[in-house]
Amino acid sequence: MLPVEPVEAVAERFLIWLDSLGIQPGEVTPLPGDVSSRRYFRVHGAEGEPAVLAVYPSSASPESAAFERFLATTRLFEAAGIRIPRILASNASDGLMLLEDLGTVSVFDLSEGSWSDLRPHIEAAIETLALLAARPAAEFAQINPLLDAQRLTDELRDAQQVFLGFSDFSGQEPERESLYAALDKLSRALASDPLVPSHRDFMSRNLMLPSDGSEAAVIDHQDACLAPRFYDLASLLNDSLFLSSSQEEQLLGRITADQDLLMSYRRCAVQRTLKATATYVKFALRGFDRHLPLIAPTLARTAFQLERLPEGGSVSPSIFSRWRDREAINEGVERLLRTSQKGSQA
């Protein structure tokens, strides 16, 4: 991760630009961003509606390409008829972008409420995925690397290394090997899945609910790529949003009754949840710990999906028990973080 510019340096950059646009901000509030070197601010103008300011790194870096990718995927999502934040103004040379402010409430924020309130938004999101997947694959092929069999496998192997950090497999090598062999089989099965235009991070936290009551808007679409056809659906129903089996069945029943297709969905769900778990741990190791509460329920979701796959039949039951032991998982992660902190202080 690249170093984050101090607020003072960032402010010096964007205040001059806002002034050139005729915007005199009455208040500029930092927003919690992702784990990158981008910064986000809510700009409250002296008059008019607030907007979100995205500030990309000013120096040449891998992040500079993200600016152009966001512009490119904006055009593609708009062409698909998908609601996304409007770009109000942009300055590529200075890495500045002013976006429509969609408020602070996401579909994820509804997950603690009633299923009757949440379900319509999830069903609408599934319709959005259909719009995206129907776009010509060639439009997305060059923006970001394909999420193909090799990348899916690499991500799973990376996740396995993270598990070694907070899981005690001592004396249980056969159990560990049973898991890794199953994941290799899963990767090979996913390799035959067709690739379609995908958001790549289509989780409920990236679906914002505008205050005007209009349809949910999709954010953070700059990583859109070609991915297995059920990857986005697996992200939506398993990453951060933890549905009951009956709720999931209701939604999947609207899509397909084909068992082979359902197995493809579950394989994507296993891959996605394991990758997400590893990402949350790595974020915490970098000092961003707000995703820690998601680790245990995400691993429980992995167990739920893997048990329903043929590959899961060869996995030791102790693995599934371990992934459902919230207390043991949290203790293991805390132990890993303490060890990492001691190492950095040495």
Image (cartoon, rainbow, N blue to C red):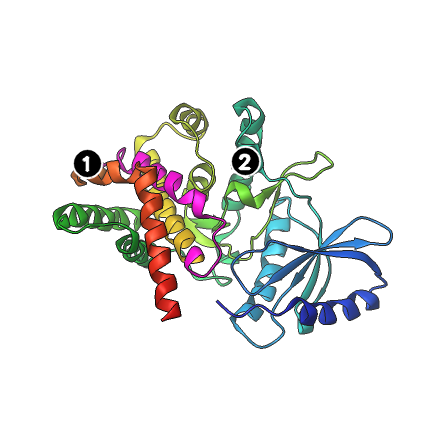
Circles 1 and 2: CB atoms closer than 8 Å:
no
Where residue 203 sits in the image (x, y, percent)?
50, 43
Gap in Å between the C-alphas at discs 1 and 2? 37 Å
Q: Which mark is residue 317?
A: 1
Q: From this viewpoint, is residue 53 visible? A: yes
Where residue 181 sits in the image (x, y, percent)?
18, 49
Residues 293 and 337: in front is: 337
Q: Residue at x 54, y 38 (%)?
A: 108
Residue at the extreme bottom: 60
Secondary structure of the magenta portion, mostly? helix
Q: Which residues are magenta?
A: 284-311
Q: Is residue 294 magenta?
A: yes
Question: Callout 2, which amino acid?
Answer: Glu
Question: Callout 1, which amino acid?
Answer: Pro
Q: Label 2, secondary structure: give it.
A: helix
Instruction: From the viewer's perspective, tell me whether residue 204 is left or right of residue 334.
Output: right
Where residue 246 sits in the image (x, y, percent)?
40, 23
Q: Which mark is residue 127?
A: 2
Where residue 160 sits in the image (x, y, percent)?
28, 54
Within 10 Å of disc 2 (Cα), the crowding (few <14, some 14-19, many 20+) is few
Q: From this viewpoint, is residue 148 visible? A: no
Instruction: From the viewer's perspective, tell me whether residue 210 is left or right of residue 238.
Output: right
